[in-house]
Image (cartoon, helix red, strand yellow):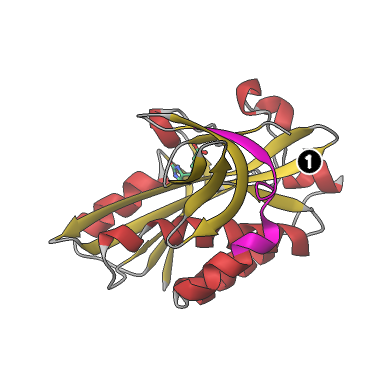
Amino acid sequence: FSVEYHDSIPSTNARARDLAGEGTSNVVVLADEQTGGRGRLDRDWHSPSGGVWLSVLFRPDVPMAHAPVFTLAAAVAVTRAAREAGVEAGIKWPNDVLVRHGDTERKLVGILTEMEGEADRVSWVVVGIGVNANVDPADLPDEANPTSLSAERGEPVDRRLFTQRLLEEFHALRQDPESVLDAWREYATTLGKQVRVETPSRTVEGEAVDIQFPGALVIETESGTEIVSAGDCEHLR
Ligand code: BTN
């Protein structure tokens, strides 16, 4: 893998997508600051200097249907790196990395995966990972209920070391997709909880009991078992 570093760039995901279009692979695009960071559902992603804003571009030889597992792998990798840095992060389905404070969960990381396929096989994947590393949560928008590594630790994190650990973990998991789900279960805060998942077509409420390859949530509802592959998940209790 080669690393492309920018002090400031609009969006590492946009840059990685451009590189994908040029036929490049196996690149990590890294920035200290993003001026036009993008989040899920077309939201803005606030990315001041001091964060870890990066995108990994690779070309896995897998069916499109398996691609969600790479997003889970990113969540696991960043959770491990955060824990090594002394921050007890957990994962809310599918890929929110959070830190619990009493009854509330604060968001530490955002992950945005983009991809393109041909004939149902993946041709490239860009996994964008945004970690509020050495950032003051007061400088981030409130809606996300944000926290940061430095706020949790009470001191800054070594961003170089953190990024290195994160990428090492991600590459190991990426090569062994079967191991991702077990690792994910280990850090999941969603399993065993009552949840409400809003999908574009329906709302499913019940107990989250397991996750299934490549990333669907299994929910026991009053009327039976439901399997949800995407949606906004709320922990009820
Ligand atoms: C979310 O909405 O939770 C996902 C946020 C993803 C942010 C990261 S930061 C690095 C990469 N570049 C972007 O523009 N977005 C992703």
The image quarter in which residue 78 lies: bottom right
* Residue identified by numbered label 1: 100
Q: Is label 1 in a helix, a strand or a loop?
A: strand
From this view, report whether residue 36 is shown above or below residue 57. above
Q: Mark 1 belongs to which amino acid?
A: Arg
Residue drawn at (55%, 36%), measured in percent from left and top? 47
Where the N terminus falls, by quadrant?
bottom left
In the rendered image, residue 236, in percent from the top left (x then y), is placed at 68, 31
Residue drawn at (25%, 63%), measured in percent from left and top? 122
Q: Can residue 38 be seen from the camera position used here?
A: no
Q: Is residue 190 magenta?
A: yes
Q: Nearer the viewer, residue 185 or 25?
A: 185
State left or right for residue 234 relative to residue 189: left
Where the C terminus falls, by quadrant?
top right
Residues shaded magenta: 184-197
In the rendered image, residue 53, in percent from the top left (x then y), is placed at 53, 48
From this view, report whether residue 9 is shown above or below residue 160. above
From this view, report whether residue 21 is shown above or below residue 150. below
From this view, report whether residue 9 is shown above or below residue 198. below
